[in-house]
Image: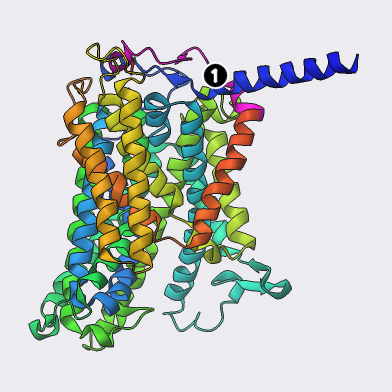
């Protein structure tokens, strides 16, 4: 009897594992953009025009960092920080090209990187991408809310009536229980206000973002114009005092200053003309950000010798040294406006991602509900605000900053891989009867090799290994890219929208550089990546695989039709 029960348990375990594997490999069938239907009661309202989308991307990307990061990095890179921002900007442009194709190719529904990976790869990959991104968004929103509270208090203290009278628990936070907790009242209040704005509708939240972003951009332009008259070109020599490695290291740091343009892709369901406007919005917002960052870099390093720049407020002190203290007030206002828009767009994107997973059944259906009159995902939006308020109100989330960016780099890499995977003609080559794998599978193997090469090159660079070993890693990535380029047939991108140029080389370069940057993160970020993936897989195994909506998914790939099914 015991042997029979043991056999039954073994069979049950095998059946469960088989079901898990089959579920994890499911992928979503999506209709082309031309099949978009009119707005229904359970859909978001299309109210965002092209200008709104550009401001959305700029609002998400440029926060207070434009006034701080530029000076911090220039202390090591010198005036060469301009090249650092150019290199990082060029890398982000390549990533943006991948996002632009997919935003144009897919139907106008929420999801972004999650939806792309669900269609290009499988269900478990999409869920893991969502979890990694969401952890970044939650911690990031809490951290930004604290910074916003600090800048708001600093702005108030410019007035004599408030100077020195605002308690710590309103600004930087008051530590409790030996630093285990850090109480901050203003951060949750600010989050509640922004959440309320977002719940009112996309028109209202877009109007707030447009006003604040315009204010921020005008202030940055005023700073650039005012500083241009104080430039001494002698301060630009030597241009790279610590060599090109310092410039390259600076590029890996400032890369994250451009993060945010991908928010435009998550507004697809609320865009008036998504197939045309999303690619322009993604690229346009990024180019605006690159121009502003480079302008600030040139002014900052031209006004003051890079060795004399302060780390905390380099731009404000540079203008103060020139007798232009009024600019410091503008910088404080710009920092508050910048952090407000970054936080607003971050909360907006979070709710749309939750909405997408709620619709697909991978999260409880409460996240998929749209308010009948406000036409916003009310429950998702309130949940995102609560999570950020709790984290920002009682924890010192700034200490978690070194484990951020994992989700961003993961998402960017997967999106680049999606472009290649969806372009591959997945059909077996009849010329070789012994061929055991399809073109699509072989292409994915090449993408994995490129990612591993990028990580190994990043590790070797980080620990100053011999250039020969770094070049070997680069060579492996080049060979894998060449295999993709010369041995694979590519389908045309669906629809008549934007097409990423240089496929597969452009996506391969994106993957290599993104994973190279991943290797530069703190080792705790790597641990976070592994632990979060394990926990997310457990959640999917216990909930997601059983509740997923299977009406639009396929359980296994049909090699003959893959290039048409997505």
Measured along the vertical axis of the image, is residue 221 above or below residue 197? below
Q: Residues within 10 Å of mark 1 (few under 14, many from 20)?
A: some
Q: Please, which colouring scheme is shown?
A: rainbow
Q: Position of residue 48 (x, y in %)?
A: 30, 35
As drawn, is 362 to the left or to the right of 147? right
Q: Does the magenta stretch include residue 545?
A: yes
Which residue is at 61% across, 18% downward? Answer: 19
In this figure, what is the number of numbered marks? 1
- The magenta segment is 542-564
Please identify the quadrant where the N terminus is shown: top right
Please identify the quadrant where the C terminus is shown: top left
Q: Quadrant of residue 38?
A: top left
| Residue linked to disc 1 | 22
The front one of 14 and 421 is: 14
Q: Where is residue 28 in the image (x, y as percent from the top left)?
A: 43, 20
Judge whether residue 254 can be spotted in this image: yes
The front one of 57 and 213 is: 57
As drawn, is 536 to the left or to the right of 254? right
Q: Does the magenta stretch include residue 358?
A: no
Q: Where is residue 221 in the image (x, y as percent from the top left)?
A: 19, 65
The front one of 359 and 126 is: 126
Which residue is at 24% across, 57% downward? Answer: 471
**Please, what secondary structure does the residue beneath circle 1 have?**
helix
Which residue is at 26% across, 39% downward? Answer: 480
């Amino acid at each position: 009897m015991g042997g029979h029960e043991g056999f039954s348990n073994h069979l049950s375990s095998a059946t469960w594992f088989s079901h898990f594997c089959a579920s994890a490999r499911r992928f979503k069938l999506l209709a082309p953009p031309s099949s978009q239907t009119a707005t229904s009661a359970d859909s978001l309202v299309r109210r965002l025009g092209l200008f709104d989308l550009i401001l959305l991307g700029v609002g998400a990307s440029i926060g207070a960092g434009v006034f701080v990061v530029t000076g911090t990095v220039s202390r090591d890179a010198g005036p060469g920080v301009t090249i650092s921002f150019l290199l990082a900007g060029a890398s982000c442009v390549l990533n943006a090209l991948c996002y632009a194709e997919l935003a144009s190719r897919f139907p106008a529904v929420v999801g972004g990187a999650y939806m792309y990976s669900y269609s290009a790869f499988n269900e478990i990959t999409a869920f893991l991408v969502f979890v990694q991104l969401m952890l970044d968004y939650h911690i990031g929103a809490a951290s930004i809310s604290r910074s916003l509270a600090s800048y708001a208090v600093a702005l108030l203290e410019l007035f004599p009536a408030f100077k020195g009278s605002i308690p710590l628990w309103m600004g930087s936070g008051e530590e409790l229980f030996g630093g285990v907790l850090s109480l901050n009242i203003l951060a949750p209040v600010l989050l509640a206000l922004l959440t309320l704005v977002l719940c009112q509708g996309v028109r209202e939240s877009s109007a707030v973002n447009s006003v604040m972003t315009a204010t921020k951009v005008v202030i940055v332009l005023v700073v650039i114009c005012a500083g241009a008259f104080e430039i001494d070109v002698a301060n630009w020599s030597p241009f790279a005092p610590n060599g090109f490695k310092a410039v390259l290291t600076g590029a890996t740091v400032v890369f994250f200053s451009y993060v945010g343009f991908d928010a435009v892709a998550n507004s697809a369901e609320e865009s008036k003309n998504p197939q045309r406007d999303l690619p322009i919005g993604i690229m346009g917002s990024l180019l605006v950000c690159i121009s502003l960052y480079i302008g600030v870099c040139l002014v900052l390093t031209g006004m003051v010798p890079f060795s004399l720049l302060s780390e905390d407020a380099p731009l404000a002190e540079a203008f103060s040294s020139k007798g232009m203290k009024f600019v410091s007030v503008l910088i404080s206002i710009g920092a508050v406006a910048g952090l407000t828009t970054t936080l607003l767009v971050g909360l907006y994107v979070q709710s749309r991602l939750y909405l997408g997973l709620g619709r697909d059944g991978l999260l409880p259906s409460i996240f998929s509900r749209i308010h009948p009159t406000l036409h916003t995902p009310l429950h998702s939006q309130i949940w995102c605000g609560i999570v950020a308020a709790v984290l920002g109100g009682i924890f010192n989330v700034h200490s978690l900053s070194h484990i951020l960016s994992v989700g961003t780099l993961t998402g960017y890499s997967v999106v680049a891989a999606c472009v290649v995977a969806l372009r591959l003609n997945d059909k077996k080559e009849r010329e070789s009867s012994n061929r055991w794998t399809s073109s699509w599978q072989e292409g994915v193997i090449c993408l994995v090799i490129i990612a591993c090469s990028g990580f190994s090159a990043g590790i070797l660079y980080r620990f100053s290994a011999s250039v020969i070993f770094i070049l070997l890693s680069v060579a492996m990535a080049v060979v894998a890219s060449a295999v993709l380029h010369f041995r694979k047939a590519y389908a045309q991108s669906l629809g008549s929208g934007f097409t990423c140029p240089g496929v597969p080389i452009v996506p391969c370069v994106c993957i290599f550089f993104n994973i190279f940057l991943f290797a530069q993160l703190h080792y705790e970020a790597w641990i976070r990546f592994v632990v979060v993936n394990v926990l997310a897989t457990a959640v999917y195994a216990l909930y997601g695989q059983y509740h997923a909506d299977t009406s639009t998914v396929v359980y296994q790939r049909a090699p003959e039709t893959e290039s048409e099914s997505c």
